[in-house]
Amino acid sequence: MNNYTTRLEHQFPRIAEAIVLLWGHPEMDAYFNKIAVDERGDREGFPPEVMSDLLMLATLHAHAYPFANSRVQYANGGMRFHRGIGFR
């Protein structure tokens, strides 16, 4: 692992690639839910550092792209992003 690669990219390259491809699309929220919840019962889970990064990315995505049909809910008056600039 080099200084420019996150633990997520190094340990879970397919997940990192999927995040890059889905970012900005409604399917991203569904993907975050899919990888965070073990519906099969046979997964080990993510290391704490990776899970922390995934939760941060899910929160950033939900704030930046508040899709109406997203399962992620935030209180009214929260931060919204428009062209990369945050507004309250």
Image (cartoon, rainbow, N blue to C red):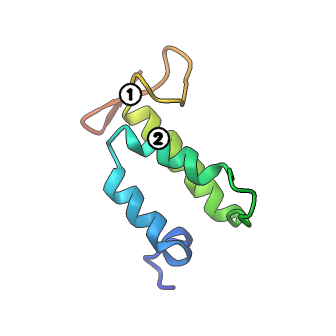
Residue 64 rendering spot, x and y as whole percentages:
38, 35
Q: Is residue 51 left or right of residue 31?
A: right
Residue 75 rendering spot, x and y as whole percentages:
56, 18
Q: Which residue is mark 2?
A: 29
What whole-number distance in Å separates the C-alpha atoms at marks 2 and 1? 9 Å
Q: Tag 2: Cα neighbours inside 10 Å, few (<14), some, or many (≥20)?
A: many
The residue lying at 74 percent from left, 67 percent from top is: 44
- Please name whichever residue, 72 or 31, is drawn nearer the observer in this view of the structure: 31
The residue lying at 40 percent from left, 60 percent from top is: 18
Q: Earlier in the sequence, mark 2 or mark 1?
A: 2
Q: Which residue is mark 1?
A: 67
Q: Which element type, helix, strand or loop, lies under badge 2?
A: helix
Residue 2 rendering spot, x and y as whole percentages:
47, 85
Residue type, label 2: Asp
Q: Is residue 22 left or right of residue 63?
A: left
Q: Are marks 2 and 1 in contact (CB under 8 Å)?
A: yes
Query: Is 68 drawn above or below residue 50 in the view shown?
Result: above
Q: In the rendered view of the protein, which quadrant contains the C terminus?
A: top left
- Please name whichever residue, 15 or 60, is drawn nearer the observer in this view of the structure: 15
Query: Is 87 drawn above or below residue 48 in the view shown?
Result: above
State the image quarter where residue 7 is shown. bottom right
Residue 65 rendering spot, x and y as whole percentages:
37, 33
Q: Which element type, helix, strand or loop, lies under badge 1?
A: loop
The residue lying at 57 percent from left, 44 percent from top is: 33
Q: Is residue 45 left or right of residue 62?
A: right
Q: How many marks?
A: 2
Residue lying farthest to the front in this orientation: 40
In the picture, the disc for residue 44 is none
Residue type, label 1: Phe
State the image quarter where residue 72 is shown. top right
